[in-house]
Image (spheres, helix red, strand yellow):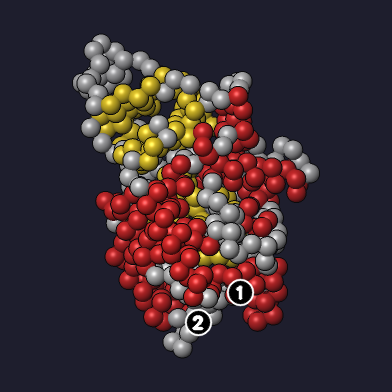
Amino acid sequence: MLTKIENVWVLNPRAPLSLTQSQSHAVDVFYGCVIIKDDTIIYAGKPEGWNDDEGLAGGAQERQFDTIVDGKGKVLIPGLINCHTHVPMVMLRGLADDLELHNWLEQAVFPIEDRMTPEDVYWASKVGIAEMIRGGTTCFSEMYFHMDAVAQAVEETGIRAVLTRGFASSGGDGGAAKLADGLDFALRQRNGAGGRITTMLGPHAPYTCTPDFLREVAALAAEHQLPIHIHVAETAREIDQIREQYGRTPVELLEDVGLFGTRLLAAHGVHLNDRDMEILATRGAAVAHCPASNLKLASGIAPIGRMTAKGINVCLGTDGAASNNNLDMISEMRLAALLAKGISGDPTAMPAADAMHAAVAGGAQALALEGVVGSISPGMKADLALIDYQKPHLTPDANLVSLLVYSCRADDVTDVMVNGQWLMRDGLLQTIDEYEAMEHCNKSIRRIKGSL
Ligand SMILES: [Zn+2]
């Protein structure tokens, strides 16, 4: 299967040269075409002629394409990567507003989650995946439960995902059963859905897992070479609690228990001191910045300018729809760029190109998918989004990167491809009956609310 997207402006963030290199991340902008063979990009560049035998130099007769997409008036970007979310929490959208994190969890979230069945999680995942595809997101990093239902939704919808079963050291067995389930899931699904699914181990947070439990997780991660996904330093209360219990910061605790032995993705990182940042940078950990969720729960604003200056890879996440309240990575880019300026008093902080980098190449690196996705270049998997720029709010078209970050909306996305498969064409989802999914989701939450 050979597809060509032609007459299109391409925005392609440059990958950083190394994990610890701090730099402003430029975005390459060029006009041309992109050619996809099966699941892989084989050409991205100027619209010269191209043929099978002679490649770019040929220029004579064109190869027969199965599909040719005219990208006139549109911009092609690598699919956006949502590095921290809990997709099935779309079921709690609007039901857990205006509460502080710990009350939010205990009073609003847990009672509903306790009643969610695998079938509820499956349909909520489909709704969330539909929302993400509609906003140009092609990959998400998930931490939740009933993860086989999430994996089934990923398999059927064609999206890419890094899946993690979250667990804590709570309950009579100290979390042993959930940890075993999380490891079993990670090993079974680590190359699932034809390689679209990869997995991590997901200890929920330093305040919900004991140090001994985290040591056990670290040993299993090292033994099976699994990355770790964990909430870290999300609230001031967490910092106080961990300092009171263990006499150190959450990041210092993670280092003490050996959790940096494999790659680590730290969600939030709102309250970090200089030493915490040095540990994260030295250990090559990534921080998933979730600005909307942090604002809504009044957790604070992560110091991403200081983090990137220290060489930490900062990527972006929406967190779940119960604390955002959507899964829109375009608005997350804009918010991240605006907040970075607002808290630093420096309007040059997080320029548009850096925000786009965080949502694409930074995300791929954080999820151990560098070299797989995050760039429109030959050899990369074809995870792409087309955005219609022929709109009043996207005129004039003089600075395409600025328009993407500061002016674009999720519904400007028209077409989305993952692994060479179209998941949306001209605004129509190709793999999800979204009305069916929404109906199931509404029914589920009515049943759960009725039983509370
Ligand atoms: Zn979270």
**Could you tell me which secondary element the residue under label 2 belongs to?**
loop
Q: Which of the two discs, 1 and 2, labels the residue nearer the N terminus?
A: 1
Residue 76, above or below 95: above
| Left or right: 426 as drawn, with respect to 349 | left
Q: Does 98 sit above or below residue 194?
A: below
Query: At x 43% / y 62%, what residue is drawn?
Result: 443
Disc on res. 170: 2
Question: Mark 1 to mark 2: distance in Å?
Answer: 18 Å
Question: Where is the N terminus found, in terms of image quarters?
Answer: top left
Which one is nearer the viewer's eye here, 381 or 79? Answer: 79
Q: Where 198 falls versus 181 (above or below)?
A: above
Q: In percent of the image, x 53 and y 23: which residue is there?
A: 390
Mark 1 lies on residue: 107
Q: Position of residue 326 (x, y in %)?
A: 55, 51
| Residue at figure coordinates x 27%, y 21% from the top left | 55
Figure check: 31 above or below 1 = above
The amino acid sitting under disc 2 is Ser
Q: Position of residue 211 (x, y in %)?
A: 54, 79
Residue 174, disc = none
Q: Nearer the viewer, residue 333 or 145?
A: 145
